[in-house]
Amino acid sequence: MDAPSLDWVDAARVKSPTDIRRAAEALNDIAHRTGMKVAPAHDIADKRTPCDDKGNILAGDVFGWASDKAWWRNPRIALDSPITTACRFESEPFWANGEGFRTRQPNRYLSSIDLTNFEARALTKAAIVVPVHLPFGQIGAVSFNPLDSSRTDLSREFEAYGDIYGLLGRTFIASYVGATGTAQALSGGSRLSKREVECLRWAAIGKTDLEISMIIGRSRATVRFHIHNASIKLDAVNRSQTVFKAAQLGYISLAR
């Protein structure tokens, strides 16, 4: 087969809703040429799976998953599958089977994931997985599963194609979400000011308005004003959601 190329990546890019099926077919063709079958999800928290502009489910119509393997109809998979769990803790491609997760860089969180009954819960013996972390905390994923469903060792494919799978998966899911408008949107005036960010940083670690006012040398009313303004810009309903959305957009960190 041809060597991996950036042309592959552009082929998997969705440019408009009517282009979804073409991009999916291109991704499917590339995967098959490398001995893999694709399982895409634009949001692991949502049992809905990518569809073309006519509403046809790509998993069945393009990627060839039979009705008895309709993983997208399983409402528990987002919570129970070790693969989707791993996507919450890893942002780079990895491969997994019942013996564990393999990544380019060590990730201590993955070692704590329960692998009991891996095949039954992940609906595959082994897979190379591309987590796709999108704006507003949405997480997508593309799983590349061997056409030979009995295989459990994908180390060779991961070494050869893991990075190109990463580019392909992220390109397809991110462009699909962009083309279909399924990502949450903010107004153009959502940029936070330096003072708003400062107040939210202190609020994120549990400081009260009075404590923040003492720290930054402003009145409590001024602190409330800045946090309220931030909530309006981020379309948040309360203080907690304002802090959470600010963290999702990279204004502040929730890490301790």
Image (spheres, helix red, strand yellow):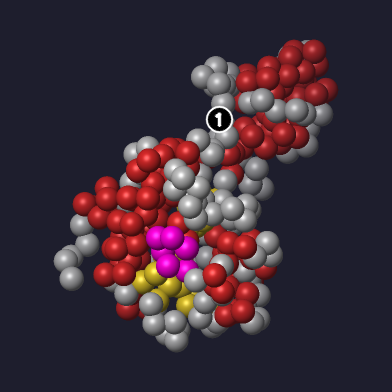
Packing grade of label 1 (10 A; few <14, some 14-19, many >=20) is: few
Spot occupied by residue 113 in the image (x, y as percentages of width and height) = 63, 71
| Residue furthest to the bottom | 150
Residue that carries the numbered disc 1 in the rendered image: 185
Residue situated in front as seen by the camera: 167 or 92:
167
Q: Is residue 171 in view from this perspective?
A: no
Q: Is residue 173 magenta?
A: no
Magenta-colored segment: predominant secondary structure: loop
Name the kind of residue labelled 1 in the image.
Ala
Q: Is residue 61 magenta?
A: yes
Residue situated in front as seen by the camera: 85 or 227:
85
Part of the protein shown in magenta: 60-65
* Residue 185 located left or right of residue 235: left
Spot occupied by residue 34 in the image (x, y as percentages of width and height) = 29, 71
Spot occupied by residue 158 in the image (x, y as percentages of width and height) = 36, 72
Residue situated in front as seen by the camera: 17 or 131:
17
* Residue 23 located left or right of residue 252: left
Residue shown at the point (33%, 46%) measured from the top left: 13
Residue shown at the point (67%, 68%) measured from the top left: 80
Residue shown at the point (37%, 40%) measured from the top left: 18
Spot occupied by residue 217 in the image (x, y as percentages of width and height) = 72, 16
The quarter of the picture where the N terminus appears is bottom left
Examine the rendered structure and indicate whether residue 214 appears above or below residue 123: above
Residue situated in front as seen by the camera: 7 or 238:
7
Q: Secondary structure at mark 1?
A: loop
Residue 145 is drawn in which quadrant?
A: bottom left
Examine the rendered structure and indicate whether residue 150 appears above or below residue 171: below
